[in-house]
Image: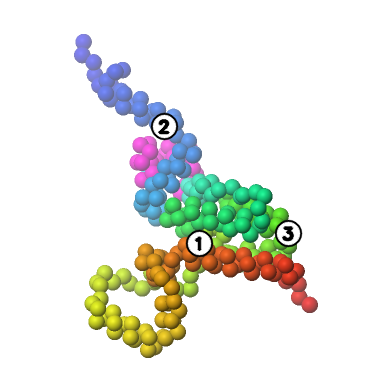
Amino acid sequence: MSRSGAEPGGKKWMSQQADATRRVRLNRDRVLDAAVALADQIGIDALSMRRLAQELAVVPMALYKHVGDKEDLLDGMVEQIIREIDDPVQDIDWKSALRLRVLSARSALQRHPWARQAIESRRNPTPAVLEYQDSIAEIFLTGGITPDLAHHAMHTLGGRMWGFTQELFDGSAGPEDETVPGIEAQAATIAHMVERYPHVVTIATATQHDEGSVVGHGCDDQFEFEFALDLLLDGFEQRHLRGWTSART
């Protein structure tokens, strides 16, 4: 007697069994890992529960057993990213420990271009976000920094705590022009800049530039970030050594 495809051993049956196995193995961590990987490819704006379900080869309703909605999904994705940050290094001075912690966060977030947008969009901090912030506070306090100074220092760090670069100038603000100006046009532009804005030109041409930068056109992103971070840490240390307090007299 012939065997239909739906009977045990048939291709359709084996496919159904494979689908069932995938559904059985689905859990929150797998959903979040898949969401992070998908967001790396298409960004969080294009990420949807339906698109993620397709990636996991399940029906969209299967996801809701593990994540409440897209907001819960994004919360979990942020938590996954934070887990990539190295643990605080012990038995070193507070400045070095904080520097390493922040640079590790920067490295983790740079692997996921959408991470900054996701973190900044969260209405309420998740446990992992709070744990990370608490670890930064702990580094300050165990290093002898007063709670008063640590409070203001964390405000000053702001997004740099996560490795975000905060820039005065944003080269992406204007419309993109794919045409490359000729040599004469470039020379005219430079001459105009030198005449109208000589001090800006002096500063802008004072060091070599990285053409792949996203921090002010052509600047070395990593160098500028570390320079600002070190400047802040040195300032915190100097105020600590002087016994600084925010108390008004």
Q: Amino acid at mark 3?
A: Gly
Say which residue label 3 marks: 144
Q: Is residue 98 left or right of residue 215?
A: right
Label 1, residues with CA under 10 Å away: few <14, some 14-19, many ≥20: some
Q: Position of residue 243 (x, y in %)?
A: 75, 69
SS at circle 2:
helix
Q: Is residue 232 left or right of residue 190?
A: right
Q: Which segment did they paint magenta?
A: 51-71
* Nearest to N terminus: mark 1 or mark 2: 2
The CA distance from mark 1 to mark 2 is: 37 Å
Residue 61 covered by magenta stretch: yes
The CA distance from mark 3 to mark 1 is: 26 Å
Q: Quadrant of residue 59?
A: top left
Q: Please identify the quadrant where the C terminus is shown.
A: bottom right
Q: Residue furthest right?
A: 249
Q: Amino acid at mark 2?
A: Arg
Q: Is residue 158 left or right of residue 35?
A: right
Depth check: 243 or 18 in front?
A: 243
Q: Please identify the quadrant where the N terminus is shown.
A: top left
Point out which mark residue 45 bears: none
Say which residue label 1 marks: 164
The CA distance from mark 3 to mark 2 is: 51 Å
Say which residue label 2 marks: 23
Residue 76 visible? no
